[in-house]
Image (cartoon, grey):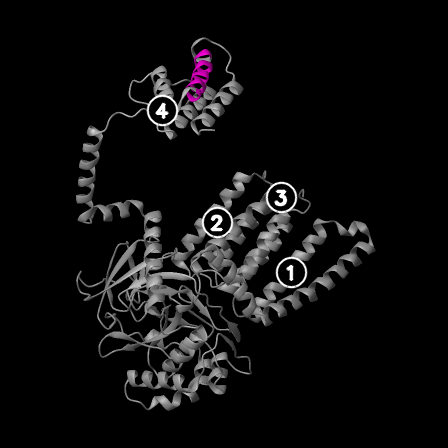
Amino acid sequence: MSPVLPPLLAALPLLAALFVHGVAHDRFVLSFPVGLTLLFFAARRRVWTHKRSHLLAWGGAGMVLGLLLLLVNEPPSGPFPGPLLSLLCTGLVGLAVYCTLSGSTMYAWVYGWLLAVLSLTVPRTAVLEGAVALLAAVTLTCIFAQMRLWRAGPGGVVGFGVFVTMVAPASLGLSWVIEENEGALARMAYGLISELGAPTGLGFEPTISLTSRASVEPTARPLLDVAGTPERLRTVVLDSFDGTTWKASRTLQSREMTAPPTGAGDHVVELVALEDLGAHVPAPSGTSVVEGVDTRVEGGWVFRGQMTVGKPVTLRTSRGETALPEQGDHHELLALPDELRAALLPYAAPFASLTTPLEKARAMEQFFHQHFEYSLSTDLRGDAHPLVVMLRERRPAYCIYFASAMASLLRVVDVPARVVGGFLPSEQNRITGRSMVRQRDAHAWVEVWDAEHGRFVAFDPTPGQGRADVLGIKEGASIFGAAINAIRSAVTRLALFIRNAPLDFLRELISFPPVPVLMVVGAVWWLRRRRSAAPVFRPGQAMDTQDPVLRRAYQRYTRALSKAGLTRRHAETDDELIARVRTLHGVAAAEAATQFIGHYRASRFRGAPVDEAALSQALTRLHSTLAGR
């Protein structure tokens, strides 16, 4: 649509969307400068020429800006990992700004509303709701002006008013439906994502949000093949809690840990990724060495690196999975919103009198095991915070809620605690000892700071037996089933290794001692056989021709004779070969061969037209006579 509104007026919806984004995620470090820049160019009333290459460039520049913002601002929280959401939002900002200044106002407003939608995945506040109302009002006003509805007279104005009156309640109703069915929508979204093979689920989430109603849909999708029987595999450490969302703080993510010298671990664990796990390297607590992939160690001893699907990765860890030391007193792990702390105080009081942090943690762990049930869905709606409703009414839940409740109670009684996400390997093969880690094994638990030893200790408040029953985790297959699973697992690992890391596979194969010996023996055998064998004529080799019809016909001729036991000898002429045909298969076969060679020679050497029908008829006759028909 050609520009109708002045650039300054057309920029108002985008300015409102930037305000929504700034309020939702406290990112005025982005919204304010971009808004001023947009106002500056729009006030000059210049409409740029819209080009696709320029649009892509502005979108790319917005993503670069998103990368720079990650260095100075907390990443936004939402339906995607924080860094990815930051890139998406700033990319939309770049596209919207360019479309506004190039006169593509409708596209600019769509990009602005997408930015607002991505920003609204946070707890609602009065200021945020006011910003959304402002965005809606400004956008509707601009649409009215852009479409020049006033020219339609009172009927156009009334029609637009009726349209807005109908759309607004429908939108609010849709919002209510989404809120009431968020669990089902989450399962559907997870199903779509899992089809793409992206690493998702509890074991990989960089943030965990607590809602009043939620559910999970575990699947048997295999993610890892593990040897060494680790108790837990850690992937994320979440130390910051605002009462609604757990996430890794910027301090923890930017902290770089230094592992002990090589060989400090006395237990070996092997991981084989069965699909792309992103930048995650699942590792047991106490892991000091990772071999087979380049890694970076973040705060909390979280290993980051790109594992190659099918390629083994070796971990060296402490036996018993004793955590490695961490510096600091970790007072930041006591942070809790005042209102939530006060609400949880009555439920934490029975544990406050215990002496040590670990005694308090053990008592809380037993409390959850004895008084709660595991469920894949939870309904914690009520007149208080979801965790308070859960503790007060002993409602069933799943691991995220148990871990959140225990970590919060520990913080109330002045015990530093954090939530950890990862996997509980549960499907061990009784023959090979290897474990298959599936998506349903994703889990969350609690780590408690032990100041006496300077390390964290893991506790799991989730009722274990109830979890196994609900997830359908069985004790183990029969010997026959275990053997079948072992073979299937080995073949899968080998196939993935060959497909995704062929050079590494060849290197491993050659370094296996029997392989070079077999290669040498095979080469010697092949050379000796080649020297002793008589030269063999290959169809079309001696009488090659550029004509494809003649070449195919002659190859069919020699194959027919070869099937009848008449492989052509080295330097043997066609006439000599036909003489052998007469001796072994009679006159009729020899006459059919002579007929074919006559047509072949006439076309190749005497310039006669290629008679494909005659060649085919002669070959058919030859086949019949050789077969004795």
Determine whether label 4 and label 1 are within 8 Å by CB. no
Query: Who comes first in sequence, dot 4 or dot 3?
Result: 3
Q: Quadrant of the N terminus?
A: top right
Looking at the rendered structure, which numbered label has been put on residue 62?
2
Label 3 and label 1: CA atoms lie apart by 21 Å
- Residues rendered magenta in the picture: 588-602
Q: CA distance from mark 4 to mark 3?
A: 88 Å
Residue 103: mark = 3
* Predominant SS of the magenta segment: helix
Looking at the rendered structure, the secondary structure element under dot 4 is: helix
Residue 524 locus on image (x, y percent): 17, 36
Amino acid beneath label 2 = Gly
Rate crowding at label 1 as few (under 14), some (14 to 19) or many (20 or more) other CA atoms within 10 Å.
some
Name the residue: 59% across, 47% down: 100
* Type of amino acid under label 3: Gly
Is tag 3's residue or tag 1's residue first in the polypeptide sequence? 3
Q: Nearer the viewer, mark 2 or mark 4?
A: 4
**Which comes sooner in the sequence, label 4 or label 1?**
1
Q: CA distance from mark 1 to mark 2?
A: 24 Å
Residue type marked 1: Ala
Give me the residue at 35% from left, 48% from top: 500
Q: Nearer the viewer, residue 272 or 527?
A: 527
Nearer to us: label 4 or label 3 = 4
Of the two numbered discs 1 and 2 on the same chain, state the one appearing first in sequence: 2
Pointer 4: what residue?
Answer: 584
The answer to whether residue 7 is left or right of residue 560 is right
Q: Which residue is mark 1?
A: 136
